[in-house]
Amino acid sequence: MRQDAVEMRSITKRFPGVLANDRVDFVASCGEVHAIVGENGAGKTTLMNVLYGLHHPDSGEIRVFGQQVRILSPRTAIGLGIGMVHQHFMLIPAFTALENIILGQEPVALMLTDYAKAENQLSDLCERVGLQVDLHARVADLSVSSQQKVEIVKALFRGARILILDEPTSVLAPSEAESLLMMLRRLADEGMCIILISHKLGEVMDYSDRVTVLRQGRSVACLETRKTSREELARLMIGQEKEPTTCPPSARVGRPVLRVSNLHVVGKNGVVAVIGVCFDLRAGEIVGIAGIDGNGQRELVEALVGLRFGKGSIFLNDIDISHMCVRRRLDAGLSYIPEDRRFALIPDNRIEENIILGLHRLPPFSHFGLLREDAARRFAERLIEEYEIRAAGPRMVTRLLSGGNQQKLVLARALHCRPKVLVACQPTRGLDVGSTAQVHQRIIEARDLGAGILLVSFDLDETLLLSDRVMVMFRGRIVRVLTRQEADREKVGRLMLGAVE
């Protein structure tokens, strides 16, 4: 019989206007992968933040390896053998991978950090768990998947026997996600307790031993994975059956609304990241960009929206925007959903303030240079209802929203003005099944209203589902453009790895 690694009983956690966890019970054992699923705002991340010491419960009891504990901070949690890899990584970009991993745990010789000893220890650890990490690379220069590996090694270096991962595959290519999940499976087989927060029910079914379902802050079920199904989990999460999203091909494709010619873009490290990219995006179509993270997608998007300048030309509705600033591009009809919602929101501002960002200078929100708060509030109330954002009201502080509801807020702001071109990066990152379907439907509706949609997603299934055409990027170049009929998972996967046919 497996030993219980974590036992949480009747955990309650409140924030202003929000009951995040309502008497939640959760038990995870050594030697298992235990998944936690639920809609956005169901309390999954909050519960794990309580276990990791980032939040203190208002009531309830926690036992770790059978011992009742009070976890006052992450330092306490680490001392108990608990590690956590957050959805948004907690790394210092200017430090190397090695410096990030050993920070606060540095081996010392003669009162100085013994980097040689640290490197030997980390090399042995990486080899044991099957992770390849460039210990001397600056974190700022690493891909998202490599940064995630750094976070995992950091937790293991600190002696984690309980490892929590929050949406670990949300930004990974399919092959990278599979490698990560297989590694987690091996760690569990060696006796570790792996707690996996995920919205990807296929991964939950394939790799977990048990699954706990949260709904509206309460635990509604704890099931053996082999005795349940994706359909049952989806029903338990949302309280009803959910119809799968379908995306019929575009019925009316118009003239080009975005034309990119011979675009070259230099990346952060001075290396050319985008090489001679040319494409057209037409009104009324969705063009997906497929590629493993780090092949120039991020730099291409930054050049399109004005965050990074490159050589070449970019035309929006026959207007050369190549040298325009971000604001002028937005005024010309471009809308943008950033890959990381933290760069789209001001966390300590109210929802009503965030939802009019970029519009606050315009009527009806501005009158003789003064902000009309009543207009902003009415606008926020309408979009909260329309996009089903779970919030206490428009005056709620944005950081108190769950990650998924923050993502809905960003989407609502990007789509409400009916843009000519929408650049959507990871639009469903961190969203549950129901919310993902809502976002997909909104994107399809925007396409059918005549917008050109450029979709950048590391979820290949999402790209294939929504796209009328798929452009595959490899090492900064577009290696192939496929129609909906030509694009299948196997063919696109080969092209993503550089197999040019």
Image: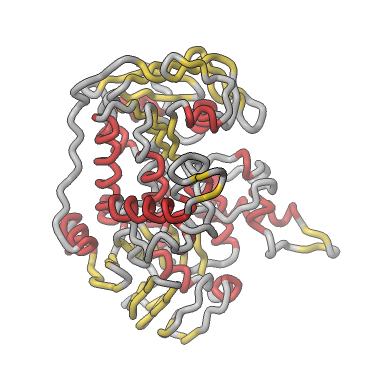
Q: In which quadrant will I find the N terminus? A: bottom left
Q: In which quadrant will I find the C terminus? A: top left
> 485 or 192: which is nearer to us?
485
Q: What is the image's colouring?
A: secondary structure
> 305 or 130: which is nearer to us?
305
Question: Where residue 395 sits in the image (x, y, percent)?
Answer: 44, 62
> 435 or 91: which is nearer to us?
435
Question: Where residue 227 sits in the image (x, y, percent)?
Answer: 17, 64
Residue farthest along the front direction in this orientation: 368
- Please report the residue visible at 30 percent of the width from the left and 54 percent of the height from the top: 432
- The part of the image, by quadrant, that contains residue 282 is top left
**In the rendered picture of this protein, how many numbered marks are placed on residues?**
0
> 208 or 232: which is nearer to us?
232
- Please report the residue visible at 30 percent of the width from the left and 62 percent of the height from the top: 38
Question: Where residue 375 sits in the image (x, y, percent)?
Answer: 42, 51
84, above or below 222, in the image? above
- Please report the residue visible at 33 percent of the width from the left and 62 percent of the height from the top: 35
- The part of the image, by quadrant, that contains residue 363 is top left
Q: Is residue 309 left or right of residue 187?
A: right
Question: Where residue 89 sits in the image (x, y, percent)?
Answer: 54, 53
Q: Is residue 412 left or right of residue 142?
A: left
- Please report the residue visible at 69 percent of the width from the left and 48 percent of the height from the top: 95
**Looking at the image, can residue 81 be seen?**
no
Q: Is residue 133 left or right of residue 408?
A: right
